[in-house]
Amino acid sequence: MKYILVFVWVIISKAVFDLLFFREVKIEREIFKEKNTALALSYAGFLLSVAILIYNTFTYYTFWEELLTLAFLTLILLLSVFLFDLIFLKKIDLRREILSKNTPAGLTQAIYFIASSLILSGAYWDKESLLLSFSYSLLYLTLGYILLFIATFLLSRILKLDFEEEIKNNNLSASVALGGLTLSVSVVIFSALSGESFGSLFMDILITLLYFVLTLILMLILYLIFEYVVFRKVKLSHEILENNLSASLVVASLFFVSALLSVVIMG
């Protein structure tokens, strides 16, 4: 039964994805006939994010509870990425850029999908009833997205990079760096949101915020150590502006390694 549900749900999710993001085109034709790599990346990120949600959903529940939970999480995933595109990348129309075959735009949206699925997985709370579970999850999901927005905004300012402008100019290196940054922050948020409950909603949120802030500071310190000690002879942000893909891969990996080490250190 679960195998049938997975198959059917992927089809339904794709139909909703088509309608919400790219209703004006046929995705299969755009990807395979028009060879739109940007759209292919976005679609791949979406499918991976749905797979992550399915993996985290099929664990504890009855069939109908799994179905309702999966429907809830998938809907929130699609809406959250749609809104995050509008809020964080408000200077550019990400959907239009993707349809114009802007590969960095497609990669950016793919990363948003994956990061959102990680945050959703960390934010979902298993309570006495589905209604209570959904209510707690929406609260923590909102908190997670606020943290993602603030952290990504601050770290982009530290890097002194205008990601919106660079993505619009088809700078693949900038989107790779932004992707590494976004995924790294989402890992920290996942760790913060999925911590143990202390029995009080106020205390849970307070501890979550404290854990997130301390872990993010530690992540930033580790990143700066890597950049200014290990790679002190190269100004990585300048290399990204020059669309140096090698430099952006280094930046993305440094952020991700710093995030993982920070989570391990914080416990």
Image: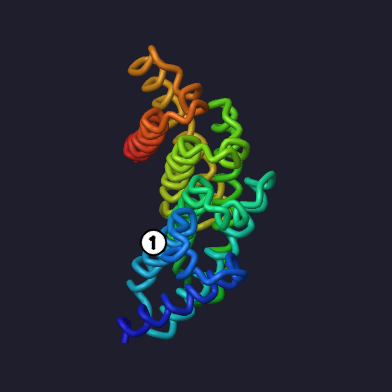
Tell me what residue is drawn at x 42 percent, y 54 percent.
Answer: 194
* Horizontal side, residue 267 vs residue 204: left or right: left
Tell me what residue is drawn at x 58 percent, y 38 percent.
Answer: 169
**Where in the figure is residue 82, as x and y percent of width and height?**
61, 59
**Where in the figure is residue 110, as x and y percent of width and height?**
47, 54
Q: In the orientation shown, which residue stands out farthest toward the front?
A: 33
Q: Nearer the viewer, residue 132 or 105?
A: 105
Q: Amino acid at mark 1?
A: Leu
Element at badge 1? helix
Q: Nearer the viewer, residue 259 or 90?
A: 90
Give the vertical position of 242 relative to 207 (above or below). above
Q: Is residue 217 visible?
A: yes
**Where in the figure is residue 250, as x and y percent of width and height?**
36, 30
Identify the residue under disc 1. Answer: 48
Q: Is residue 211 visible?
A: no
**Where in the figure is residue 189, as x and y percent of width and height?**
47, 47
Tell me what residue is drawn at x 46 percent, y 24 percent.
Answer: 239
